[in-house]
């Protein structure tokens, strides 16, 4: 718990809402997802035409593909560690404290009404309201599915080393999806989940920060949330 801050009108308490690692991973994942959307869209429709040359120097597609795969594995690594932090890190207790509220219909109804501008936001335990919690959980599932299909695609191109091991471990993805072509289509469709999620996420975060200016967007930078009372 940090010191009380005198706002001039009211006294607020500063709480650590997101640990340093959680914030670092948020921004690294944001960067990875942006790079993956742009490079993935390019892989799906390579539109750049290099000047023809007899020298082996035109690697536009290969560079973009490499960036996609590097950031793909960065996303996988961060996401695994992020799940670990959620369950086991002391600094994530605010996030874990939000979980029981998803079983409380009253909090759900009040949250949705406040988003519809017809009610006050309910008191929330922890970092997220139930709608935020379920949204971020859905995002985690989306990351899991796009990672599994991505690894299956990767293993079908790189047959030795890591690709060889992953090929054995993820062969079932191809079987479940009904062939490699379907894996690719599913990977492509899942991309649209991220394309839709990002603007909605930014809009909701900014909207929340403007309507309830007690931390809002800056808490994922500073880690601090300000509250009037000591119950968080
Ligand atoms: C937010 C995450 C991701 C997005 C938005 C994304 C998007 C895409 C898109 C749009 C394509 C092109 C599909 C097509 O041909 O129609 C693609 C291809 C591919 N992705 Fe991802 N991807 C993501 C994560 C990953 C991950 C985690 C991996 C695993 C390392 C991965 C590996 C691949 C591979 C190997 C290909 C095929 C490249 C090729 O055909 O040359 N992707 N991705």
Image (cartoon, rainbow, N blue to C red):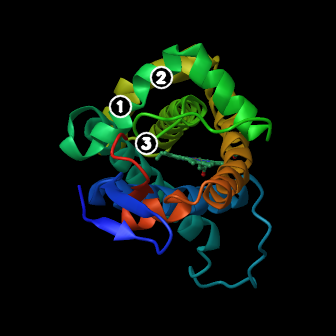
Q: Dot 2: within a 10 Å radius of its alpha carbon, few (fewer than 14), some, or many (20 or more) residues? A: some
Q: CA distance from mark 3 to mark 1?
A: 7 Å
| Left or right, residue 232 beside residue 67 | left
Q: Dot 1: within a 10 Å radius of its alpha carbon, few (fewer than 14), some, or many (20 or more) residues? A: some
Q: Nearer the viewer, residue 89 or 12?
A: 12
What element does badge 3 sit on? loop
Q: For residue 54, which quarter of the picture?
A: bottom right
Q: For residue 153, which quarter of the picture?
A: top right
Q: Nearer the viewer, residue 186 or 174?
A: 186
Residue 75 in the image, given as x and y percentages of width and height: 43, 50
Residue 27 in the image, given as x and y percentages of width and height: 45, 62
* Tag 3 residue: 127
Residue 67 in the image, given as x and y percentages of width and height: 50, 64
State if disc 1 and disc 3 touch (CB < 8 Å). Answer: yes
Q: Earlier in the sequence, mark 2 or mark 3?
A: 2
Residue found at x 67% / y 52%: 198
Q: Earlier in the sequence, mark 3 or mark 1?
A: 1
Find residue 138 and name its label.
none
Farthest front residue in view: 9
Residue found at x 39% / y 38%: 126
Residue found at x 28% / y 38%: 93
| Left or right, residue 151 beside residue 177 | left
* Tag 2 residue: 101
* Tag 1 residue: 97
Q: CA distance from mark 2 to mark 1?
A: 8 Å
């Amino acid at each position: 718990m940090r010191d009380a801050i005198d706002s001039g009108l009211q006294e607020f308490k500063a709480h650590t809402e997101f640990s340093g690692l959680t914030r670092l991973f948020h921004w690294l994942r944001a960067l990875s997802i942006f790079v993956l959307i742009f490079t993935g869209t390019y892989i799906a429709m390579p539109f750049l035409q290099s000047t023809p040359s007899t020298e082996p120097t035109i690697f536009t597609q290969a560079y973009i593909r490499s960036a996609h795969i590097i950031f793909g594995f960065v996303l996988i690594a961060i996401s695994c560690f992020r799940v670990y932090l959620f369950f086991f890190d002391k600094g994530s207790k605010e996030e874990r404290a939000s979980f029981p509220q998803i079983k409380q219909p009253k909090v759900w109804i009040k949250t949705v009404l406040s988003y519809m501008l017809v009610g006050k936001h309910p008191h929330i335990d922890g970092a997220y309201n139930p709608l935020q919690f379920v949204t971020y959980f859905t995002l985690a599932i989306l990351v899991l599915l796009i990672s599994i299909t991505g690894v299956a695609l990767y293993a079908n191109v790189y047959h030795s080393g890591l690709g060889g091991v992953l090929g054995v471990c993820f062969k079932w993805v191809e079987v479940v999806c009904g062939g490699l072509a379907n894996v690719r289509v599913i990977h492509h469709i899942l991309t649209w989940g991220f394309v839709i999620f990002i603007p909605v996420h930014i809009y909701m975060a900014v909207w929340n920060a403007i309507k309830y200016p007690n931390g809002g967007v800056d808490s994922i930078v500073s880690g601090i949330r300000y509250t009037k009372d000591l119950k968080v």
